[in-house]
Amino acid sequence: MKLAPSILSADFANLQRDVQVVEQAGADLLHVDIMDGHFVPNLTFGPGMVAALRPITSLPLDVHLMVADPQAWITPFATAGADTLLIHVEATAHIFHAVQLIKAAGVKAGVVVNPGTPLSQLEELLPILDQVLIMTVNPGFGGQPFLPAMAEKVARLVTVRKQLGLHFEIEVDGGVNDHTIATVAKAGADIAVAGSYVFNGAPAHQLETLRAFAK
């Protein structure tokens, strides 16, 4: 399983240090949560953060857009250096077109589904996606507890992927720690985002622990 530390829980005053620590500790991706204060109540970063991260890490930047009107932000974040752009199916009435725009921008395309959103919303999109992110908490704030029912949702998506012969990666985000990562690994997730668990301790040790429990 790939591990994607979320910088939402990093020390913003020492962000370069924290990014380099997790990179040296073997993180596979760097997850960047973008919140606009509209689609979700929290407010975080803009394209400038991605542009600032790009020169200081070789890790792929996994950029999660929790924003209203995601189409307006595809080009700015792609230009800033995102490797993957993940947009919420709930955020636009034109999700297929938005995915096409991401592809046209030359980055990997992913969609995100909130806990209450059924997988049926993704049916027409799956053949053109690189990733699907299943939220395992309600989006907007870090540090929330994992929602156990979402593991079954992951398992159902794994089954659909196999039935259709597709190869998109399945990512989970929210409440991932040493107690929950085995659950999502068993369900079949390919990527786990972890923020509070990684950065509220010694990041290298926390990542090593997650890897051990994900086996």
Image (spheres, helix red, strand yellow):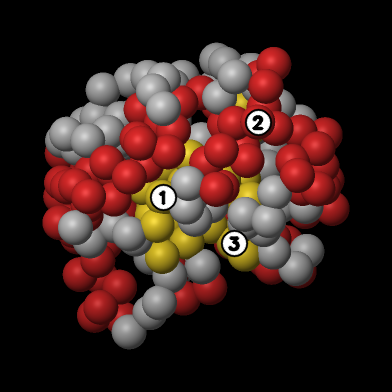
Q: Amino acid at mark 1?
A: Leu
208 vs 153, left or right, is right
Q: Secondary structure at mark 1?
A: strand
Foreground pick, 73 / 46: 46
**Location of mark 1 (residue):** 3
140 vs 1, left or right, is right
Q: Nearer the viewer, mark 1 or mark 3?
A: 1
Question: Whole-percent x and y of residue 194?
Answer: 40, 36
The quarter of the image holding the N terminus is bottom left
The quarter of the picture where residue 154 lies is bottom left
**190 lies above or below 153:** below
Question: Whole-percent x and y of residue 187?
Answer: 17, 56
Question: Whole-percent x and y of residue 59?
Answer: 62, 54
38 vs 82, left or right, is left
Disc 1 crowd, CA 10 A, few/some/many (<14, 14-19, 20+): many
Let me know if residue 93 appears in the view: no
**Location of mark 3 (residue):** 109
